[in-house]
Amino acid sequence: MTLYDSPEDREFFEAIGRLVISWSYLELGIDGIVDILHGLKVAHNIEPEKPRSLKRKLNYLKKAIPTLSMKATTKERYTALISDISNASVTRHNIIHGVVTAFPSGSSPARFSRLTPGKGDGVSKSTITTLEVLRAAVEVQDLGKPMLNWTVDFHDHIDEYVKQLEQRTE
């Protein structure tokens, strides 16, 4: 039995750990915005129940952004951010929700498979190298900062948003 303890193996598994940690910061920002919007009942007509999965959260934000009282350029920036996050989530999804089906010790790439009920043959297959995992982690880190900044900005202006909502319902 292979122990998967070569330096290359450790680098690969460390890269996956870095990707997971990077996503945790990004998802903290996503959860913050979803919590604020849902708590303010800004987009209850879009999603009456607070979304829990990443895909549903991103869809919720994509639909909620146009309803927010902010400059058009700001809406465009946040819409682009959500789109970039959605694109980056494919790699995350394949790794986090997939299983390694081929990974010869000391080599790369690894092959992942994950179940995709209702799509094609029901199995999605992908390969990824250590370098690709690291690039994905850096991309996610870069997306995390504007997402967290958006959350802080929303929090800092929450009284203003509440007043705007109250005016809409009067």
Image: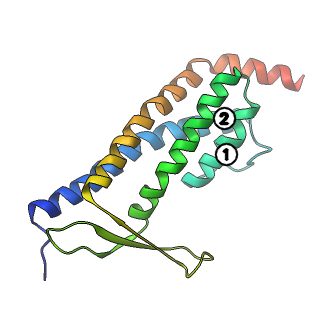
Residue 127 lies in quadrant: bottom left
Residue 10 as seen in the image, left or right of residue 149: left
Q: Amino acid at mark 2?
A: Leu
**Percent coordinates x, y for residue 31 in the rendering:** 53, 41
Q: Can residue 21 be seen by looking at this rendering?
A: no
The total number of labels drawn is 2
**Percent coordinates x, y for residue 131 in the rendering:** 26, 53
**3D distance between C-alphas at marks 2 and 1:** 10 Å
Q: Which residue is mark 1?
A: 60
Q: Which residue is mark 2?
A: 37
Q: Reply above or below: 105 against 24.
A: below
Disc 2 crowd rating (10 Å Cα; few below 14, some 14-19, many 20+) is: many
Secondary structure category for the residue under label 2 = helix
Residue 16 as seen in the image, left or right of residue 42: left
Q: Reply above or below: 118 against 77.
A: below
**Which label was assigned to residue 41?**
none
Looking at the picture, tell me which residue is in the foreground, 46 or 59: 59
Q: Are marks 2 and 1 in contact (CB under 8 Å)?
A: yes
Q: Residue at x 17, y 56 (%)?
A: 11
